[in-house]
Amino acid sequence: MDLLTDIFRQAGLRRRLLDLHQLLDATALQFPCDRSMGLHVVTAGRVYLHAPSLPQPLCLQTGDVAVMARGCVHTISTHEDMGAVRTVSLAHAWPLPQSDTPGDAPPNALLSGAYQFWHNPVHPFFDEMPDWLVLRAQDGPYPRAMAHSLELLQQELARRELGSETLVYGLLDVIYVLLMREMLQRQGTRTACWSRAIQDPQVMKAVQAMHDDCARAWTLDKLAQHAGLSRTSLAERFRESMGNTPLNYLRTVRMQKAMAALIESERSLEQIAREVGYTDAFSFSKVFKRTAGVAPRDFRRQDTQDKALAWRIA
């Protein structure tokens, strides 16, 4: 299975919001993203991104793309100074205010998409994501696939023709995966992180094996044999590139898959325990609580309550 796809699926990734916002001069958009990661594309004009994690407002111009990590609550406005604008929260006001003059198109437009995690992800990929990744149009042309996808997405949002919804969400997936590839490439130059580790072919083989069959009784010897390395070499290369041990990473993969199983099915704890490599529900529950902070049954119950609340607010 493709690693990035598996990580997103097991983390409970869901599309939550996608639209083309036209920003009036006196309006700011507040994005309550405590459970979301996503992107903004400036399709016209100039906007400012305000966030607690930024030392100062970030200016974005036509063609710029800003990618946010999970939990980066932020506001976007047409002014660097937020004191002169009226803030509209996307959690409570939809659709957005329109221009008072019929046919008068605001000069600033923003294309936004978000992916939402219903439960707390545990995979290191999410921890190492920078709060913001910005691609500037002025720094050079985007790769052809990115440029074409952005253009098609904007056209479909504007036209709203038959089949547009299917095309729009498909294009959003394409754009987001391309952006994640860019982020992985940039993060891969750092020391000791997941993005760097998967660039090592032998470490990648071991990581892929754990994702493909986390229920298998993997040992360091078996993983090393699968990767074509000695036990010592795999442990050293894993630690050097990822800052972790193979068996600790295996536990992370198992817990993420267990979270997905708990919220997507009614299977018993005994069944889920076996599916993710534990011999009984007791040992599984003990590791799960140490990792997630709550027992599996409480996790399943809380996730159901959170989803119900989120849909009532939306």
Image: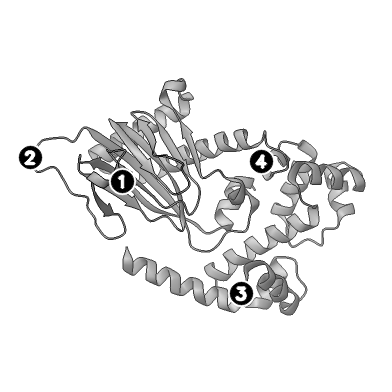
Q: Of marks 3 and 4, which one's residue comes earlier in the chain?
A: 4
Residue 11 lies left or right of residue 283; in this view the side is left
Give the numbered dot on residue 102.
Answer: 2
Closer-to-camera residue (106/81) = 81
* Residue 163 in view here: no
Q: CA distance from mark 3 to mark 2?
A: 53 Å
Query: Alpha-carbon distance for marks 2 and 1?
Result: 20 Å
Q: Amino acid at mark 2?
A: Pro
Question: Is residue 9 toward the left or the right of residue 124 in the image?
Answer: left
In percent of width and height, residue 49 lies at 37, 41
Task: Look at the numbered disc 3 and give the secondary structure of its residue.
Answer: loop
Q: Which residue is mark 1?
A: 19
Q: How is the image coloured?
A: one colour
Q: Quadrant of residue 164?
A: top left
Residue shown at 33% from the left, 44% from the top: 76
Q: Amino acid at mark 4?
A: Ser
Residue 122 in sight from this viewpoint: yes
Q: Quadrant of the C terminus?
A: bottom left
Q: Residue at x 73, y 42 (%)?
A: 192
Q: Residue at x 68, y 58 (%)?
A: 253
| Mark 1 and mark 3: Cα distance apart in space | 36 Å
Real-space CA distance between mark 4 and mark 2, rounded to the nearest whole angstrom: 49 Å
Mark 3 sits on what residue?
A: 294
What residue does disc 4 label? Answer: 195
Separation of marks 1 and 4 at Cα, in angstroms: 30 Å
Q: Position of residue 48 (x, y in %)?
A: 34, 38
Answer left or right for 174 relative to 75: right
233 w.r.t. 59: above or below: below
> Disc 3 versus disc 4: distance between alpha carbons?
28 Å
